[in-house]
Amino acid sequence: MNKSAIQKYAIWARNELRDQIAKRGYYFGIDADGINVDGKDETCVYARDGRLLTDTERKQRNELFRLVKEKGFDQVVEEVSYTWFNRLIALRFMEVNDYLPEHIRVLSNANNEFKPEIKTRALDLEDPHFDKKKILNLIDKNDDEELYRYLLLTECNALNDILPQMFEKIGGYTELLLPNNLLKADSVIGKLVSDIDEADWDVKSEGGQVQIIGWLYQYYNQELKDQTFNDLKKKNKKISKERIPAATQLFTPDWIVHYMVENSLGRMWVEGHPNDELKSTWKYYLEEAEQEPEVEEQLKEIRKEYSKLNPQDIKFLDPAMGSGHILVVAFDILMQIYESQGIRPREAAKSILENNLYGLDIDDRAAQLAYFAVMMKAREYDRKIFSRGIQPNLYSIQESNGIDDSLIDYVARGDKKLRSDLKTLVKEMKDAKEYGSIITVSELDYKMLGERIDKLKNDPSLLDIEAIERITSLVKVGSLLAQKYEIICTNPPYMGNPGMDSKLSTFVKQNYPNSKMDLFAVFLEKCIQILRKNGISGLITQHSWMFLP
């Protein structure tokens, strides 16, 4: 794998996407110097070149206008850039491995040339998402750029049906800001095809998908990470909530992940279900050291408990999952465990997604990639997994800021217990993007909360689906933080107390006084708290935890 080429492309792509997306914003009258270029307001109906906007474009621009007022132009550009980056690398991965439903490449052709097959075979597309009349009209106009733009957007929306957490429905400002000139050889798509070896995307290559996805994610953040630490070092500018992912994200090399997972998940299984054949496939598995007799007796009792476990019983959590490397390796080892029990890969893949793997991260883009990586791993074992409607228990942590009593009352509908639980959850999840998995939540009736929300979603009179989705995210994340796990493995975020802003520093001092000096130590303590009795925790830590007060 050519990491140098991957690094060069990812850093360049972030800057190129940001530049092109900013230009699109400017074209529609919005830029970094002011929300409204030339005094244009929210009712603007013309683009910068005087063209009258379509009704759809006006709605999309209004959405962009409101979002820029709320978050600022630069933050919106950053979010749209990584959204398109994630989608493009997902499309590239799927087309190389022939995982796209139509089996038609979107970014290249069968010879790996930057001649998108979807454009040359547009009339062969059978998916109902594609409008044949519109395609014919664009072909007649000989408008290749607009045709490809339409096909790319429609393909992403079609993939929402099978991979909703990766390909969120496009529309609004995200569609509006898709860069121009996509078919140029030096575009973000053109260089994605030409600059990174096709073999690096192949699941059958060494390291497979996780390596390429993880390294692309890390390198995409490289300049932002460098800038964050320069600001901390030279200006004593504390690391903000928005910068924590870039500052703390570090891709974990493959051998380290295998070492951790084989000696936690693998160990728990083979100590309760001895299997030399399984162990022989684990390159980094270490046999138990010789113990004193009294310790050996205790270990025998623990192994008796392990022997009672079925594969479906093992809950495996990565509370800072990044782009999903640890979860994907855990998937492979769980598959070996299931198969050793005579369970077929198709049934095992379904069960692993539903029962075994759990993951959380504060970074929306990382959570998207982890979700994608795990679903692609499931696809290796079950060709029809996308059509089964199964979604893994992997979530981006969302915060409750802005959720008021009126929304809580709307969801509770007079149910006092439900209202009380919701108020508690909303209080505990405030500023959750800052704290992540180290939040402690109460043991609430998450099943009841989930059932109420599902009922509301099916209510035809529901007016604010986005507000309900926010509550849904809180309930899903809260339920994961409230339960116990047999195995926890993670590469925790590293951030010393001097780098923390005042809010995070105060939080860890109040809630983790024994480990407050660094986030990695806080995570070490937190993971022990949410382990089941005799569970196993595997983390990458500094040796300093043994010596610091």
Image (spheres, grey):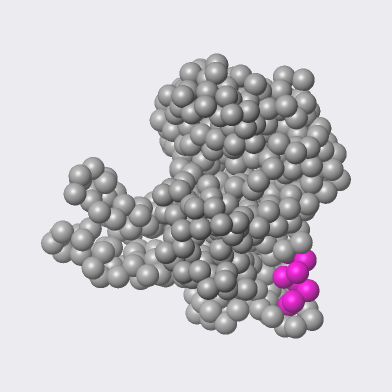
Q: Quadrant of the C terminus?
A: bottom right
Residue located at (54% from left, 53% from top): 51
Q: Which residue is located at x 60 percent, y 56 percent? A: 49
Residue 45 lies, in percent from the top left, at 46, 58
Residue 67 can be seen, yes or no: no
Nearest the camera: 358 or 409? 409
Is residue 221 depicted above or below 282 in this figure?
A: below
Q: Nearer the viewer, residue 304 or 360?
A: 360
Where residue 527 appears, x then y in whole percent?
54, 58
Looking at the image, how many numbered discs can be counted on the residues?
Answer: 0
Q: Residue at x 56, y 63 (%)?
A: 29
Q: Depth check: 124 or 235 in front?
A: 124
Q: Is residue 455 above or below residue 474?
A: above
Queried whether the magenta region covers residue 247, the answer comes back as no
Magenta: main secondary structure equals helix
Residue 447 sits above or below residue 342 on the image:
below
Residue 254 falls in which quadrant of the image?
A: top right
Magenta-highlighted residues? 225-232
- Tell me which residue sits at (59%, 32%) in the image: 147
**In x, y percent, where is residue 416?**
16, 64
Outermost residue on the front side: it is: 50
x and y, in percent, of residue 129 in the image: 44, 28
Residue 127 in sight: yes
**343 vs 298, nearest the viewer:** 343
Quarter of the rendering containing residue 379? top right
Quadrant showing the N terminus: top right
**Is residue 385 positioned above or below 34 on the image?**
above
